[in-house]
Image (tube, rainbow, N blue to C red):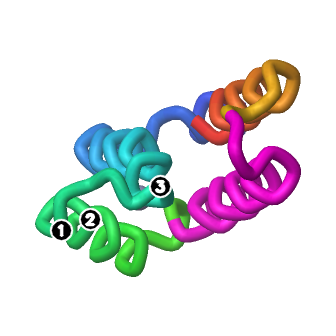
């Protein structure tokens, strides 16, 4: 029954993590206002789980920016990012 235990985490904490992860892309692209970016930064530093996710996200973003500097992410890679994000939740 360890699968069930995995999903019975406290929900308030999860909500904050979901919000942080949703804003992480804007954060990485410097699209957040300073105050919003600070909220994300503080949460990432306080939350080990998000810090791990953030490392993954920033690595992916770096990959995308390196391979397609002037364009949006290729469809295949964007789809893979969505799969990874779903896996993390
Ligand atoms: Zn978190």
Q: Secondary structure at mark 3?
A: loop
**On the rendered structure, is 32 left or right of 18?**
left
Q: Circle 3 is placed at which residue position?
A: 29
What separation in Å lies between label 3 and label 2 (alpha carbons)?
11 Å
Q: Circle 1 is placed at which residue position?
A: 34
Q: Quadrant of residue 47?
A: bottom left
Q: Secondary structure at mark 2?
A: helix
Task: Using the image, determine if residue 88 lies above or below residue 59.
Answer: above
Q: Which residues are magenta?
A: 51-71
Q: Secondary structure at mark 1?
A: helix
The numbered mark at residue 37 is 2
Question: Which residue is rendered at x = 54% and y = 63% of the image?
Answer: 49
Where does residue 81 sit, x and y in percent of width and height? Answer: 73, 34
Q: Quadrant of residue 55?
A: bottom right
In the image, the residue with mark 2 has its CB under 8 Å from the nearest atom of ligand 1: no
Quarter of the image containing the N terminus? top right
Where does residue 83 sit, x and y in percent of width and height? Answer: 75, 26
């Amino acid at each position: 029954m360890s699968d069930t235990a995995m999903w019975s985490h406290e929900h308030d904490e999860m909500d904050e993590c979901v919000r942080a992860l949703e804003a992480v892309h804007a954060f990485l692209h410097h699209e957040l206002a300073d105050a919003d970016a600070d909220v994300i930064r503080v949460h990432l530093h306080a939350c080990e789980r998000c810090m791990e996710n953030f490392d993954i996200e920033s690595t992916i973003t770096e990959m995308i920016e390196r391979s397609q500097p002037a364009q949006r992410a290729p469809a295949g890679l964007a789809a893979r990012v969505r799969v990874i994000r779903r896996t993390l939740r």
